[in-house]
């Protein structure tokens, strides 16, 4: 990677990200770390899976992000009778022009909130595969590009099993990160109780970055320098997940790439044009945990998530950081 | 090797990378601790091999259980809780019972130590228990070491020390990782997570991964340093015989295997076991003095009664002088012309209390005072007790002719009253019944072939020949059954026999013929170690032969039907040829040479050789310093001469050119070369070995602790950011590395100063 970033580009990016961060903090209180991770995911051009209980601010988070960057936001509530065409769009016959016209679905937006994604049937979930991977929808052999930037915020409740269809591994692999929101601190919740009126529609945020600026940020992230020893560090972590007996299978190549890209994005979010090992180490759980399953049976999904997290922490602690 | 806990929560934005070195997790440290504890236990219990303490079954049990617990660390969880509850009362009761039954403290303590180790080996250990393993192991190893003082012991204590150091390091690391928190008492039956996850293959891979060669090298250098200091101390401190001052000599396991005793019984002849372990090592200052077939005399057996040859009480009383305690003794040999030849004998423990000698000697010196008895006329030296460790003694003026002069006996023999049976002179009593005596006389007549006045040497020759003709040599002899004396039964048969039978028969025949004769036991032959140039005599070289008194010369001649005639030994060329024939260059000789090195340099250290060694070390050091000083002085003188030589144009130009060249090379190095080496490091072919990045990484590591502790001053943050850029950033954007390092040095110094000031 010889084409390094210019100092001016970094400053510009840092300023833009700072504006975004400040804007989101207006509505998302006490969740700076989550906001930071969301920004990393955005800059990396990835999609986000948020697992948490209803009502902790998942939609607000997605909406705030969309509003802050002057983007089209759409929300799809996934249910078991939701059809793929309900998500991607459908071609209907237009009597006036005597031909089929493609009617765009809700994915044709910049920030798509796929609420309770595990309630839809696998067929509908798979409808998201192409659009998440290639940012386009193909209907009747015709490709339709979705918005740019394009980011899917999927949410799911890991505790409820009734009437759900767990996401297939291929789908999981397409999410860059998986996050938990968690309850806010008492002092932040008090602030929310004091200030918040109405639902997310009532959120009035001024856009602080343009769509093109976001696209530029994403392009910039790919230019962030990764030193060989840091790449080696990523490789060691990925390899360790493959040799770890606790896991059913290790992380895919896509997972390794995701970790590298996310680390690059984090470096940019932190205002650097090069990746530090800590960028990698900090993101391991968020980027890799949802791609891994335990070899043994666990009592429930939460237990499995905790166990996977613990093993990943052990792996990271065990691998020497490049010094 | 180093370790750190899990990372703390992410700190606020800003450069907070913490350079972490290779790490082992807490679980892995516990696994390493378990492994090292097991190894220490095994090393300690194996010392039973050296000791004559009835603890073999315990050793086997501990080895098996500890080994099993090592391989399967989950096993101790299956030990029922009741066993843990009962363990200590049972062990204490066993110890008390042991003491009461055997009333021997040391063996009971050894067994107690092993029992405790056995228990520790099969239960999950806390820190206190780990330390107990070290102390118990040390006790066993030191006891065994004091008893043997052998090369193997040195090796064992070396390995044990290394393992213990590693063990203590791991204990400390585990402690620091647990943040000083005392873990609750381990409940019986609970499986610790580290044991549940134990996978030795993975652990070894991890150990290899996390090993920091710098730390390992440093550790090895430190260990070598400790060894060197210990060796120097060892050279300097006065030597003393440790076991003499303790009560341990009864517990040494190595007992005589060559069968040297004060008697030989022929009735129950058993097969001689071929024990090839080394019995005696002999260093000789002049190898041309080594006889073709050396006979290392030890015991003289004069009395024959009831089928047994023994060292008679009368002769013991008469010949063996009083108990003496001294470092040296004078022998019967007269000083001879020419350079003195020194023979240094290293007699292994458990061989005999009689010291092997080739013949008469002028002077015999021990390395420290010994209790001994000297039988000058028999040429036998006996220590009061069988030595429990290797005994070294140096002999001067050793007579290698094989002829033992005995003027006292000659006088007694001449003054004897032929009419009275010479009771006092056991060497003349045949000691068999009348009928057997008749058989013996018949054989003697056959040997003498009618000539009654046969000389001793001629009789010897003929008897040897007769015995060789009638009996074959075998290590598994057979004595025909029947009534009467067993030796005579064998003699009149045609059965094969071993050296004792041959020697005994010879003596009986000689005595029947009227010659005083006796059996002598010791060693014959040996091999010449080609590596360390010394004689090595093994237990399998043990031999018995006869000595017959020659009235004409007043000396005892050797009679050995299985040996080489004395006359053959005179030529020096023959001796050398024999030595070459005996040359041993096998692998065992190589190993033995190590032992000889150990004896020569470490064990056999009398005051003189100790002083010599110290002097040699001092001289070597002084010489090195002197040579260095001389070299510097020579260089100075050369430079002075060169400067004071007349200067002409050519010299000036040459000198100027040299200065310019050197200046140019220095400039090139500063401007380009250093950059090339640091910046590209092409010939090492890799970014990992990029020295600038590595240096920046080291600076980051040095600053890691201060950044968290001192609340990150602005300057510190800036310099860390610069260092991070140099370490991980694109080269094109680097600030000037030298400047960054200088700044880092200054900031670090400043932070340290502030921290000291803050206390």
Image (cartoon, rainbow, N blue to C red):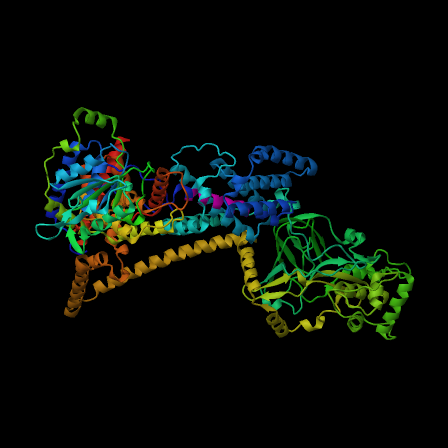
Residue B365, by quadrant, is: bottom right
Q: Is residue A201 visible?
A: yes
Where in the figure is residue A196, as x and y percent of width and height?
17, 27
Q: Is residue A287 left or right of residue B201?
A: left
Does the magenta-highlighted stretch encompass residue A286?
A: no
Q: Is residue B191 left or right of residue B695?
A: right
Q: Nearer the viewer, residue B714 or B317?
A: B714
Residue B742 visible to an observer of this rendering: no
Can you tell which quarter of the image residue B462 is in?
Answer: bottom right
- Of residues B13 and B231, the one drawn nearer to the viewer in this rendering: B13
User: As rendered, which of B116 and B5 lies closer to the eye?
Assistant: B5
Is residue A314 positioned above or below B495 on the image?
above
Q: How many marks?
A: 0
Relative side of B235 to B528, left or right: left
Residue B694 percent across, percent down from the top left: 26, 51
Image quarter of residue B463: bottom right
Residue B436 in the figure: left or right of residue A220: right
Task: Provide the residue span drawn in magenta.
Answer: B28-42
Q: Is residue B34 located in the magenta-colored stretch of the structure? A: yes
The residue lying toward the viewer, choosing from A21 and B378, is A21
Q: Position of residue A269 (x, y in %)?
A: 18, 43
Residue at (84% x, 64% y) in the render: B488
Q: Main secondary structure of the magenta part?
A: helix
Q: Give the answer, above or below, for where B483 lies relative to B610.
A: below
Which quarter of the image is occupied by the C terminus of chain B?
top left
Rendered location of residue B186, percent (x, y): 49, 34
């Amino acid at each position: 990677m010889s084409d390094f970033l210019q100092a001016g580009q970094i400053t510009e990016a840092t300023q833009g990200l700072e504006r975004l961060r400040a804007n989101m903090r207006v509505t998302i209180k006490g969740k700076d770390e989550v906001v930071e991770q969301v920004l990393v995911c955005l800059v990396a051009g990835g999609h986000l899976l948020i697992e948490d209980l209803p009502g902790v601010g998942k939609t607000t988070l997605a909406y705030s992000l969309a509003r802050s960057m002057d983007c089209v936001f759409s929300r799809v509530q996934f249910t078991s009778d939701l059809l793929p065409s309900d998500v991607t769009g459908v071609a209907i016959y237009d009597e006036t022009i005597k031909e089929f016209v493609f009617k765009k679905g809700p994915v044709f937006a910049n920030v798509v909130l796929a609420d309770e994604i595990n309630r839809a049937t696998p067929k509908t979930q798979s409808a998201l595969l192409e659009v998440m991977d290639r940012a386009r929808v193909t209907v009747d052999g015709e490709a339709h590009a979705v918005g740019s930037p394009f980011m899917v915020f999927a949410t799911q409740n890991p505790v409820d099993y009734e009437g759900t269809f767990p996401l297939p591994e291929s789908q999981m692999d397409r999410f860059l990160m998986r996050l938990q929101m968690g309850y806010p601190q008492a002092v932040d919740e008090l602030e929310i109780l004091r200030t918040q009126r109405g639902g997310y529609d009532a959120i009035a945020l001024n856009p602080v970055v343009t769509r093109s600026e976001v696209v530029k940020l994403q392009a910039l992230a790919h230019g962030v320098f990764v030193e060989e020893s840091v790449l080696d560090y990523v490789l060691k972590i990925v390899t360790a997940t493959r040799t770890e007996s606790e896991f059913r299978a290790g992380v895919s190549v896509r997972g390794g790439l995701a970790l590298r890209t996310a680390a690059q994005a984090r470096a940019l979010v932190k205002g650097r044009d090069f990746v530090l090992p800590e960028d990698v180490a900090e993101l391991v759980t968020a980027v890799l945990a949802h791609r891994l399953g335990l070899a043994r049976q666990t009592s429930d999904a939460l237990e499995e998530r905790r166990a996977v997290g613990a093993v990943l922490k052990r792996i990271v602690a065990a691998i020497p950081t490049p010094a | 090797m180093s370790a750190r806990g899990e990372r703390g929560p992410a700190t606020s934005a800003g450069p907070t990378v913490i350079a972490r070195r290779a790490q082992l997790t807490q679980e892995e440290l516990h696994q390493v601790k378990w492994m090292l504890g097991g190894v220490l236990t095994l090393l300690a219990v194996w010392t039973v091999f050296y000791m004559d303490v009835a603890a073999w079954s315990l050793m086997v049990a501990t080895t098996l259980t500890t080994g099993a617990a090592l391989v399967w660390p989950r096993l101790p969880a299956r030990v029922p809780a009741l066993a843990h509850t009962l363990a200590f009362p049972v062990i204490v009761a066993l110890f008390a019972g042991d003491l009461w039954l055997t009333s021997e403290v040391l063996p009971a303590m050894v067994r107690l130590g092993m029992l405790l180790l056995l228990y520790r080996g099969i239960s999950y250990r806390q820190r206190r228990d780990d330390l107990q393993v070290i102390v118990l192991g040390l006790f066993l190893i030191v006891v065994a070491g004091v008893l043997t003082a052998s090369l193997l012991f040195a090796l064992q204590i070396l390995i044990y020390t290394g393992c213990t150091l590693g063990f203590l390091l791991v204990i400390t690391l585990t402690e620091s990782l647990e943040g000083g928190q005392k873990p609750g008492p381990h409940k019986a039956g609970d499986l610790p997570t580290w044991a549940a996850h134990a996978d030795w293959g993975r652990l070894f891979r991890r150990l290899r991964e996390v090993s920091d060669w710098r730390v390992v090298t440093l550790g090895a250098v430190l260990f070598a340093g400790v060894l060197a200091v210990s060796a120097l101390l060892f050279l300097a401190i006065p030597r003393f015989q440790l076991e003499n001052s303790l009560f341990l000599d009864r517990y040494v396991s190595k007992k005589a295997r060559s069968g040297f005793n004060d008697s030989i019984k022929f009735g129950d002849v058993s097969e001689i076991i071929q024990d090839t372990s080394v019995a005696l090592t002999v260093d000789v200052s002049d190898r041309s003095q080594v006889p073709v077939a050396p006979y290392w005399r030890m015991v003289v057996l004069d009395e024959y009664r009831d089928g047994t040859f023994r060292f008679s009480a009368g002769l013991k009383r008469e010949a063996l002088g009083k108990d003496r305690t001294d470092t040296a003794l004078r022998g019967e040999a007269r000083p001879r012309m020419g350079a003195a030849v020194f023979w240094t004998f290293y007699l292994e423990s458990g061989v005999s209390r009689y010291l092997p000698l080739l013949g008469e000697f002028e002077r015999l010196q021990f390395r420290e005072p010994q209790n001994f008895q000297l039988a000058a006329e028999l040429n036998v030296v006996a220590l009061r007790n069988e030595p429990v460790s290797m005994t070294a003694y140096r002999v001067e003026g050793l007579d290698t002719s094989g002829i033992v002069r005995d003027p006292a006996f000659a006088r007694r023999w001449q003054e004897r009253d032929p009419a009275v049976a010479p009771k006092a002179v056991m060497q003349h009593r045949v000691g068999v019944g009348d009928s057997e005596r008749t058989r013996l006389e018949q054989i003697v007549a056959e040997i003498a072939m009618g000539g009654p006045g046969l000389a001793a040497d001629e009789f010897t020759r003929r008897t040897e020949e007769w015995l060789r003709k009638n009996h074959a040599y075998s290590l598994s002899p057979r004595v025909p059954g029947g009534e009467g004396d067993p030796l005579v039964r064998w003699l009149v048969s045609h059965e094969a026999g071993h050296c004792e039978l041959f020697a005994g028969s010879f003596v009986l025949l000689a005595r029947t013929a009227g010659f005083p004769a006796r059996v002598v036991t010791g060693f014959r032959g040996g091999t010449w170690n080609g590596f360390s140039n010394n004689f090595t005599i093994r237990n399998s070289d043990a031999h018995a032969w006869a000595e017959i008194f020659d009235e004409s010369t007043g000396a005892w001649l050797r009679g050995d039907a299985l040996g080489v005639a004395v006359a053959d030994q005179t030529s020096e060329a023959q001796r050398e040829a024999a030595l070459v024939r005996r040359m041993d260059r096998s692998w065992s000789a190589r190993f033995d040479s190590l032992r000889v090195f150990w004896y020569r340099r470490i064990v056999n250290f009398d005051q003189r050789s100790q002083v010599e060694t110290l002097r040699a070390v001092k001289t070597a050091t002084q010489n090195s310093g002197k040579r260095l000083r001389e070299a510097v002085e020579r260089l100075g003188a050369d430079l002075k001469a060169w400067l004071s030589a007349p200067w002409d144009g050519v010299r000036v130009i040459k000198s100027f050119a040299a200065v310019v060249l050197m200046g140019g090379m220095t400039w090139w190095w500063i401007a380009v070369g250093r950059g090339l080496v640091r910046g590209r490091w092409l010939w090492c072919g890799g970014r990992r070995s990029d020295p600038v990045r590595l240096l920046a990484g080291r600076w980051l590591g040095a600053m890691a602790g201060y950044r968290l502790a001192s609340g990150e001053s602005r300057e510190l943050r800036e310099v860390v950011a610069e260092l991070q850029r140099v370490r991980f950033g694109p080269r094109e954007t680097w600030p000037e590395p030298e400047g960054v390092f200088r700044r880092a040095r200054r900031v670090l110094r400043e932070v340290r100063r502030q921290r000291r000031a803050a206390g």
